[in-house]
Amino acid sequence: MNFISFNFKRILFSKYFVFSTISILLLSLILWTIWLLVKIEIYMVWIVFATCIIWLTSIDIYTISNIMIDDVKNGVFGLEVRKGKKPNLLIWQKLLISKVIIWSTIAFAMLIFYCLTLIFKPLRIDMFLDGYIPGYTVFYTLDILLTGLCLLFGSGLSSKLMSFVISFFSAILVFSPLIGVLQTITIKELFIQEQTLNRVPLEIQKMARKNQNGLVSFLYKNLLTLNEKNNIEISLMEDADSQEIETYEQVKLKLNDNNLLERILIYYTSVGQPIDVDNYLNSNSNYNKYLKFSITDNYKNSDLFNFFNDTKIEQEEFKPNNIFISDKSMEQLKGKNQLFDYMDFLTTESMIKNLEDNYSIKNLKTEIKTLKDLFLDYWNYQRFGIKAESGSRVYNVGYFEKSFDFYDVSEFANYFFSSINDDYGLKDGNQLFIILMSNFIFQTSVLVPNTGENVKKDFAYNFVYNDWKKRRQIFLTNPVLSLPYMYLFTKISKKPEVNNALMETLMPGPAIQDLAMFENEDYIERDKWSFKDKDELPIQSFENTKLAFNPIYYYMSYLILGFSFIFIGYLIYIRKLRP
């Protein structure tokens, strides 16, 4: 007991251990807090990582040099042997005591980092809970390797040699993330196309099929109303002159030839204005001097139109500074009249009763909670909520203009759609909810499978399963990359976009994981620009692919090398000590 107490105290209460541990821990906590409060910055990820490597290396050199070398030179080893301790076991007992102290310190730091993350709740909290925090367990594996190297190079009883070699090795590890970034320059065709941005639409498709009486299923069914041709009527003003009458006939012909009339309603729904379409079309005198648009009774009497009316929430005052795209913070989701505030309105008791009585929508609270999680994922890792400018046009929901791009249809398309794009601003969560649901549901009708015969060379799916040459270039030709890779993927997130975001902090370009989207063999392609029934979509099912490279191979390599070095170093060390 005295032996254990003595060796425990001389490490734990030594000035070097106390000073270095407290200093590094405080520095790491300060950096971690800044990281949480400001935003996720790549350099902050790896500064904290490097700080921990430096601490672990210095403590291993300090403790093992004391155990192996100093105790022999100052006579402590001989004294312990004379008191009955077995020489062959002494080093193992002391190593075990030092590992208990070091590993407990690592666990304590991880616990503090975890608590800080839960307190401050950063935007991309999944990257912390699934990536950075579990990743610190890599230091247990690294400690095994460093211990093996210390025993191997310290077996000659030279602390200078051991310190030099281990410090040099540690310096390489500290700069390993930078080496990973530089490596991308040497690899051709590094960028690969991933499908993870489609996870949220596909999860919504899955919800519709799972809950036949839910809100999502209702929207899938009733958005089909927008495909009908008799929702909007166009007529000529009474005071139109002969030239305007001739132009009107041309416009009407173009509208009928290109199915633009029904697609106008689809478009305005996609930008969150499904009710007042006629007002938008008739309000611009520059475009509509002689044309008049009106919504037909067919659309006004539909369940879809009535649903949008019944779930409309009036905003007291529109303040431009409070529009959704003004900043990327949780307040822009949870603030007054913002997206989550509107979704909470949908789950009030009166609204739940209204929707169940009039539209047979059930399990609304459960679905809204799931949709909140999905919207938050998409907002964090994809593009909605980002202001994008192209010339004089501004897209407040940058990604979605791709879904409903009518500008290549005819010269008359711009006539109907340009005004709302030039002046359009997100006013409230009600509008954004319509935008998201209509766009996500529409996307599921135009997705293309990426498995089977649909695999292409530049697909991430192909990289993960077929392109061994490129994977070898990235993960095996540069062993220095192993430690940061293990750090990021000790725990593999269930969300591929999180794993790819983590990979982006190490090596911009390659997607480490993708969605495998399987084809619906019964799918029949119809009009590209129309909504489709939930049972007639091109994608039948989907799943996450495996990681492009499993970190378990790196872990196994570190452990095998570490224990091998420990065993070899021990044999040399014991032989040195024998008379």
Image: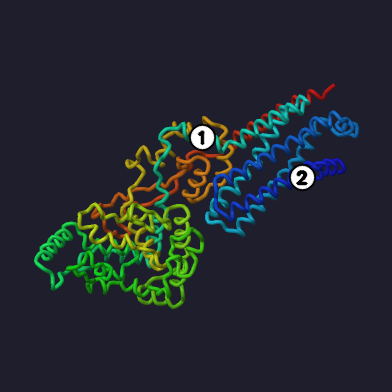
Residue at mark 2:
19
Q: Which residue lies furthest to the left in this view?
A: 242
Query: x, y percentage for residue 193?
Result: 39, 43
Total marks in image: 2
Dot label at residue 279: none
Above or below residue 401? Residue 563 is above
Query: x, y percentage for residue 339?
Result: 44, 65
Query: x, y percentage for residue 187?
Result: 45, 32
For marks 2 and 1 on the same chain, the one whose residue lies earlier in the sequence: 2
Q: How is the image coloured?
A: rainbow
Q: How crowded is mark 1: few (under 14 residues within 10 Å), some or many (20 or more)?
A: some
Q: Which residue lies furthest to the top in this view?
A: 579
Residue appearing at x 81%, y 45% in the figure: 13
- In space, the residues marked 2 and 1 are separated at their CA atoms by 35 Å
Side of 501 where 55 appears, left or right = right
Q: What amino acid is found at the position of numbered circle 1 in the picture? A: Leu
Residue appearing at x 23%, y 57% in the figure: 413
Quadrant the N terminus occupies? top right
- Kindly tell me whether residue 363 is visible in this rendering: no
Quadrant the C terminus occupies? top right
Q: What amino acid is found at the position of numbered circle 2 in the picture? A: Phe
**Residue 500 vs residue 147, the one in the foreground:** 500
Q: Residues within 10 Å of mark 2 (few under 14, many from 20)?
A: few
Residue appearing at x 62%, y 51% in the figure: 32
Give the structural element (helix, strand or loop) at label 1: helix
Give the structural element (helix, strand or loop) at label 2: helix
- Kindly tell me whether residue 273 is visible in this rendering: yes
Above or below residue 78? Residue 491 is below
Residue at mark 1:
182
Residue 125: quarter of image? bottom right
**Residue 220 vs residue 406, the one in the foreground:** 406
Residue 138: quarter of image? top right
